[in-house]
Amino acid sequence: MQASELKPFMESAVAEVLESMCFISSEGEATDEMGDDRPNWICGELEFSGIPGGAFGIAVPPSTAAVIAANFLGEDEADLSEKQTVEVVCELTNMVCGTLLAQIDSKQAFTLSPPKHVSADTESPAKSGRIQGTYALDEGFIYTWLELQATA
């Protein structure tokens, strides 16, 4: 499957998880890309093995992350700690990646590493073939990326 063929799966996975777990609707891919200017965004990353293996990540502005966390946990934004917000972004990374991989190949077993919080300046550098998208929400934006390992 070509990288360009995977992009709709990513958009679908983001929308499905946000709607079902956080009660947030995605408005599709943002027309005004945020680019690499994400210095204060909360980032989660994980690696996965299977055929193919690879890595996946999410970056979210702090204000958007707070709304996502509040909706996911059923709490008021003001009552959440930064740690809770980061943990929800990491769990969102896990859920979106799992949904994405299941959509790509529902018969393949994948093993996901625990998601980890990384600062935007230590986020994994983009590799050739990175599939990425920035999606608009009423609450802000969510940036996702996927890198697949070459298969022999």
Image: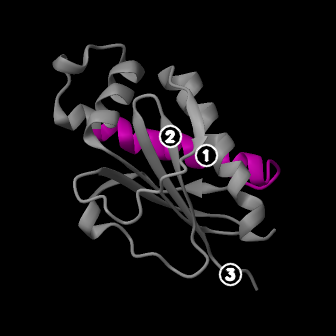
Inspect this view and state whether residue 99 appears.
Answer: no
User: Which amino acid, by three-letter code, is at mark 2?
Assistant: Ala
The span shown in magenta is: 86-109
Instruction: From the image, tell me which residue sits under label 3.
Output: 150
Choose mark 2 or mark 1, whichever is in front. Answer: 2
The kind of secondary structure the magenta stretch mainly shows is: helix
- Seen at 31% across and 38% down, the residue is 87
- Seen at 72% across and 51% down, the residue is 8
- Seen at 48% across and 24% down, the residue is 22
Query: In the picture provided, is 62 more to the left or to the right than 22?
Result: left
Could you tell me which secondary element the residue under label 1 belongs to? Answer: helix
* Occupied quadrant, residue 49: bottom right
> Depth check: 38 or 92 in front?
38
User: Which amino acid, by three-letter code, is at mark 1?
Assistant: Gly
Question: Is 34 included in the stretch rendered in magenta?
Answer: no
Q: In 3D space, how far apart are the residues under numbered discs 2 and 3 (Cα atoms)?
A: 30 Å
Instruction: From the image, tell me which residue sits under label 2.
Output: 136
Q: In 3D space, how far apart are the residues under numbered discs 2 and 1 (Cα atoms)?
A: 21 Å
Mark linked to residue 98 = 1
Q: Position of residue 75 (x, y in %)?
A: 29, 14
Question: Residue pushed farthest bottom?
Answer: 152
